[in-house]
Image: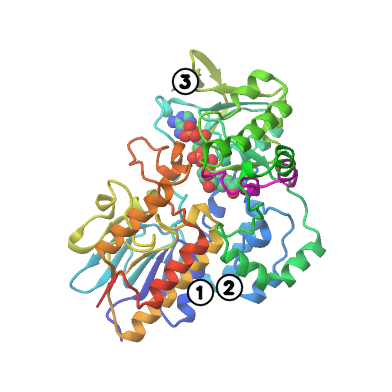
């Protein structure tokens, strides 16, 4: 008999929460998951905007933990569309009977640790309350959707949407005048798809982005069979790569390659499509001049594709390195601006003044719309956790502890919050990697850790303050040796006014990070205080 409801309570039933549930259940821990949506899928449950598709290839954007599962599922395209990924998530939930331990349509409001009992008390919006020994966050990095506080936001009488909270029944834009605000990965995918149906689309761009064509295509069954036959090796290599993706590189710095070969390499990658474009040379993310070679190549492509030179220039990023904001992967993005029904407003020269009853006023011009689509992104990484009232020892709120930026040990635990584990938290590779690889690594590591604690008779595991300080220092040091902090990106919290500018993910690489985590585990969890 235990004096609490569950060994572990997990928040979120996306890829991370589902696998965490399976692993803990298999290890004999009583586990319960709370999920805001009415089904599994997380990101892929919410992001149903037109054109939503993953930019990691299907055959690698799926679980590897079960050989039968990875063999039985058939992907239809090189890059999976939202609908197909969601179908896959549902298949996984059915296959392992996961829904039995998930409360859907239930949002966790607060989670409070008691020093007296050593338990977490978790309260939900449905009025429920449970106690658990361990609290595991599987809330994801990009789940706190954000519409900026534009003046006049409530005045608009038409329809408004955020890409990350898209209506499940879909939206028919036929015959409508549509505004899209934001040109990150979501906007860049949605704009061409919306433009195919809407009467007219006006894009409001604050920062142009570098985007590489996806070259999506149906998956050839023979190609799929070949990869599946070689899965053990390919998966092992992905786990030991820097980004969790098998991205081939020349292994050379850009200036070590003669100019014609350099150009040929970039041509080949542009034709092949996808984010591997950035991996061509070893110094692209380390050296401004090296980066400029790839950046200039993309600007040249924009000029080739977009017929109106003025529009092409507005679409060309010039003031931050390629890849320092997450590289975008698109289908027909730049070419969409050749359509007569698509217009671009550059908010740098024509700032967005206000949203009006009938549309948007920017740069002194009134634009009228039937619908506004906000592709304005997320309060990334910390936002999903800070929305929950999480309190550790002495009632300390996590949001207060992180008020100057997130502080974690290994991105998975934080001092003052015993028995709290964060899957792909800030300070881990997470968003800089194939999320599925990082999720599996964290889930396995956490499950092994809980088994260790149980076997050794410990009931309390807390990150030590000095280990955390060292880790935060290391994460910052690695980031500052790269070009990443040179862009005002959501990695840095720069998209949210007032958010501390701290580079949140760990740039050391999935391979290096895995080694560090394994070493911590192998040493009996150094850096943790165990009782
Ligand atoms: O969000 P974003 P997203 N006024 O933050 C603009 C993943 N993802 O949803 O750059 C005017 O990137 C903002 O402008 P600026 C992927 O990791 C993956 O597109 O801040 N504009 C920007 O243009 C991605 O990085 C996939 O100047 C404002 C846009 O809104 C992450 O999710 C697909 C503004 C927000 O872009 C987030 O992508 C989709 C303001 N006040 C998403 N505030 C794939 O796998 C913000 N903006 C392909």
- For the residue labelled by badge 2, is the local secondary structure a helix, a strand or a loop? loop
- Specify whether 172 is left or right of 363: right
- Specify whether 274 is left or right of 32: right
Give whichever of discs 1 and 3 has the lower sequence position: 1
* Any part of residue 355 in sight: yes
Q: Marks 2 and 1, how far apart in space?
A: 10 Å
The verdict on label 2 being within 8 Å of ligand 1 is no
Q: Residues within 10 Å of mark 2 (few under 14, many from 20)?
A: few
For the N terminus, the image quarter is: bottom left
- For the residue labelled by badge 1, is the local secondary structure a helix, a strand or a loop? helix
- Residue stretch rendered in magenta on the structure: 267-286
Residue 472, percent from left and from top: 33, 55
Question: Toward which corner of the image does residue 368 lie, by quadrant?
Answer: top right
Q: Marks 2 and 3, how far apart in space?
A: 49 Å
Q: Is residue 276 magenta?
A: yes
Give whichever of discs 2 and 3 has the lower sequence position: 2
Instruction: Write the residue at 52% across / 14% down.
Output: 365
* Any part of residue 160 in sight: no
- Reading the image, the residue beneath label 1 is 22
For the C terminus, the image quarter is: bottom left
Q: Is residue 519 magenta?
A: no
Residue 227, percent from left and from top: 73, 66
- Specify whether 406 is left or right of 248: left
Residue nearer the viewer, 311 or 365:
311
Return the mark for residue 65.
Answer: 2
Q: How many marks?
A: 3
Residue 221, percent from left and from top: 81, 63
Contact? badges 2 and 1 (CB < 8 Å): yes
Q: Give the residue furthest to the top.
A: 364
Query: 381 above or below 50?
Result: below
Q: Marks 1 and 3, how far apart in space?
A: 49 Å
**Which-is-in-front pick, marks 1 and 3?**
3
């Amino acid at each position: 008999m235990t004096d609490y409801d569950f060994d572990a309570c997990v928040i979120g039933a996306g890829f991370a929460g589902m696998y965490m549930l399976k692993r803990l259940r298999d290890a004999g821990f009583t586990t319960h998951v709370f999920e805001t949506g009415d089904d599994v899928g997380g990101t892929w449950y919410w992001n149903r905007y037109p054109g939503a598709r993953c930019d990691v290839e299907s055959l690698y954007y799926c679980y590897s933990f079960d050989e039968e599962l990875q063999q039985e599922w058939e992907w239809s395209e090189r890059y999976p569309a939202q609908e197909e990924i969601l179908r896959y998530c549902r298949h996984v939930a059915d296959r392992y009977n996961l829904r039995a331990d998930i409360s859907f349509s239930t949002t966790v409001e607060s989670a409070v640790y008691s020093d007296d009992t050593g338990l977490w008390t978790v309260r939900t919006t449905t009025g429920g309350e449970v106690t658990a020994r361990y609290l595991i966050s599987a809330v994801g990095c990009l789940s706190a959707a954000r519409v900026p506080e534009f003046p006049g936001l409530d005045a608009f009488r038409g329809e408004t949407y955020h890409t990350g909270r898209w209506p499940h029944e879909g939206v028919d834009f036929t015959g409508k005048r549509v505004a899209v605000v934001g040109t990150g990965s979501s906007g860049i995918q949605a704009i061409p798809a919306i433009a195919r149906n809407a009467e007219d689309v006006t894009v409001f761009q604050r920062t142009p982005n570098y985007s590489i064509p996806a070259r999506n295509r149906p998956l050839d069954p023979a190609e799929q069979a070949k990869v599946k036959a070689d899965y053990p090796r390919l998966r092992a290599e992905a786990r030991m790569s820097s980004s969790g993706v098998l991205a081939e590189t020349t292994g050379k710095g850009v200036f070590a390659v003669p100019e014609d070969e350099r150009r040929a390499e970039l041509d080949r990658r542009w034709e092949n499509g996808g984010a591997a474009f950035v991996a061509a040379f070893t110094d692209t993310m380390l050296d401004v001049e090296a980066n400029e070679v790839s950046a200039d190549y993309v600007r040249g492509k924009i000029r080739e594709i977009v017929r109106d030179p003025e529009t092409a220039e507005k679409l060309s990023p010039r003031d931050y390195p390629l890849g320092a904001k997450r590289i975008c992967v698109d289908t027909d993005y730049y070419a969409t601006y050749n359509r007569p029904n698509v217009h671009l407003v550059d908010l740098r020269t024509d700032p967005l003044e206000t949203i009006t009853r009938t549309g948007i006023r920017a740069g002194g011009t009134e634009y009228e719309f039937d619908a506004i689509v906000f592709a304005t992104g997320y309060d990334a990484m910390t936002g999903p956790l800070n929305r929950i009232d999480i309190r550790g020892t002495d009632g300390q709120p996590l949001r207060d502890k992180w008020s100057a930026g997130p502080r974690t040990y290994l991105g998975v635990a934080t001092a003052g919050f015993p028995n709290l584990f964060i899957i792909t938290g800030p300070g881990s590779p997470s968003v800089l990697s194939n999320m599925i690889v990082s999720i599996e690594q964290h889930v396995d590591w956490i499950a092994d850790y809980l088994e260790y604690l149980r076997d050794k008779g410990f009931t309390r595991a807390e990150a030590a303050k000095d280990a955390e300080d060292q880790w935060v220092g290391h994460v910052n040091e690695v980031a500052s040796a790269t070009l990443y902090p040179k862009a005002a990106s959501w990695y840095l919290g720069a998209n949210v006014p007032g958010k501390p500018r701290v580079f949140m993910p760990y740039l050391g690489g999935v391979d290096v990070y895995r080694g560090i985590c394994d070493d911590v585990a192998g040493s009996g969890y150094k850096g943790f205080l165990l009782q």
